[in-house]
Image: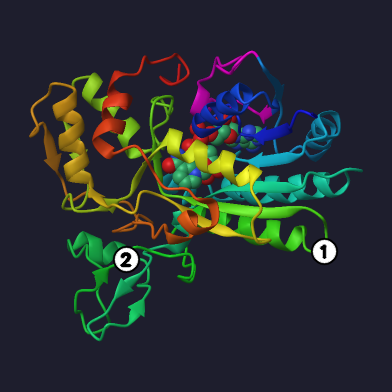
Amino acid sequence: MVKQRIFVTGGAGFIGTHLVNALSRDAAVVCVYDNLLPQVHGEEARHPSLTDHARFIFGDVRDGTALERALQETKPHIVYHLAAETGTGQSRDEITRYCDVNVGGTSRLIEAIRRLKNPPARVVLAGTRAVYGEGAYRDAHGKLVVPPPRTAQEMKARQFMPRDSASRLLHALPTSEKTPPAPASVYATTKLAQEYLLNQGFEGTSVEPVVLRFQNVYGPGQSMGNPYTGVLSIFLSQILSGQRLNIYEDGEITRDFVFVKDVVRSLELTGRIGLPRGSIINIGTGQGTTILNVARKLLNILGRREDDLDITGDFRPGDVRHAVADTTLAAALVGWHASVSLDEGLRLLASAPRTPSADGA
Ligand SMILES: NC(=O)c1ccc[n+]([C@@H]2O[C@H](COP(=O)([O-])OP(=O)(O)OC[C@H]3O[C@@H](n4cnc5c(N)ncnc54)[C@H](O)[C@@H]3O)[C@@H](O)[C@H]2O)c1
């Protein structure tokens, strides 16, 4: 049997490393294409902590020639596109950088794939729930609405909850794929552009684009030296260095935390099974947890007092208030649902050995 050849952009990153290790265990031939971004990997990064079975190509998705050469050499059956600039807050100040990598990198990837004699059957994009912005809410009349992004003025006045035009509170719902996109940050805008580009760029070709929209992914291996990374890695790093945690807004921001092994399983399954062309699928647990609650749980697991934190009212423009996935489609189309509970995942995160790259060194 021909071994599956798989090409993973951003395969040296947090999710990528877990994915590549899992794919290699399944005996696929994996090629990682990654520029070891110093913000993620540290200035001295030379080689990622990948399995010996994966080939590593140091390259930038903005370099179309190098990308095409790597794809020509690999001749992949499947491409996973994970390479991206990922900080929501940072994206507001680094608009061109985020557009160049996330949008320009994706356009170059599509063009390089289209020039292949035997293109891959499928390109799977690591998308994000950020494309929904505030996501689905129910108004006082029971109607489904997507509130506009919260303004800095509202948040300064500590009005954190989305409201309707008559200032009535809205009720947050799990967000399904049918919810119209409404990105609230530059990062989210670039990630939505990736989705559109993949669908439009492969229209009329044999390549099937699939988008998985991840909720907040957490687990061992997420860069702890990157100040723009996931909130749980930031908390972990602050707890380990003896700091008190700064809890934004009033602590009641809600997130759907999904463990990295579950996310990897969704990527693997998506690469293997038949799916309607252009499928877009939410990946999350379907359970929301407040930031205050998750911070207390992590403090507790690491033997610190649960009140070693400050609810400061600080906020970041572009942050959304509630994020919980409706995962009905993932179950129906992919047969996937999250299997690791938050308590178990946090214990695994807290007890994992910390590698130099995870520390961002
Ligand atoms: N982690 C999450 O919670 C989450 C949630 C939703 C979506 N995603 C998406 O999943 C993907 C992977 O995220 P992650 O958390 O593993 O991030 P990460 O920062 O750990 O990994 C990204 C990888 O891409 C590489 N990269 C960045 N710019 C590049 C470039 N110009 N050329 C080549 N490689 C480049 C980095 O070196 C890094 O290894 C991203 O596309 C992200 O948007 C992540």
In space, the residues marked 2 and 1 are separated at their CA atoms by: 41 Å
Residue at (66% x, 53% y) in the render: 274
Helix, strand or loop status at disc 2: loop
Name which quarter of the figure residue 137 lies in: bottom left
Q: Residue 173 colored magenta?
A: no
Q: As rendered, which of 243 and 48 lies closer to the eye? A: 48
Badge 1 crowding class, 10 Å Cα cut-off, few under 14, some 14 to 19, many 20 or more, is few
Query: What segment is highlighted magenta in the picture?
Result: 32-52
Query: Residue 139: where, in percent of width, then height?
Result: 26, 79
Q: Which residue is mark 1?
A: 204
Name which quarter of the figure residue 324 lies in: bottom left
As displayed, is residue 329 above or below residue 52?
below
Q: Which residue is mark 2?
A: 151
> Which disc number belongs to residue 264?
none
Pick the quarter of the image with the C terminus: top left
Ligand 1: quadrant of the figure: top right
Q: As rendered, which of 162 and 29 lies closer to the eye? A: 29
Name which quarter of the figure residue 50 lies in: top right
Helix, strand or loop status at disc 1: loop
Query: Residue 15: where, in percent of width, then height?
Result: 51, 33
Badge 2 crowding class, 10 Å Cα cut-off, few under 14, some 14 to 19, many 20 or more, is few
Q: Which of labels 2 and 1 is toward the front?
A: 1
Amino acid type, callout 2: Thr
Label 1 near label 2: C-beta < 8 Å? no
Q: Residue 37 colored magenta?
A: yes
Amino acid type, callout 1: Gly
As displayed, is residue 135 above or below residue 105?
below
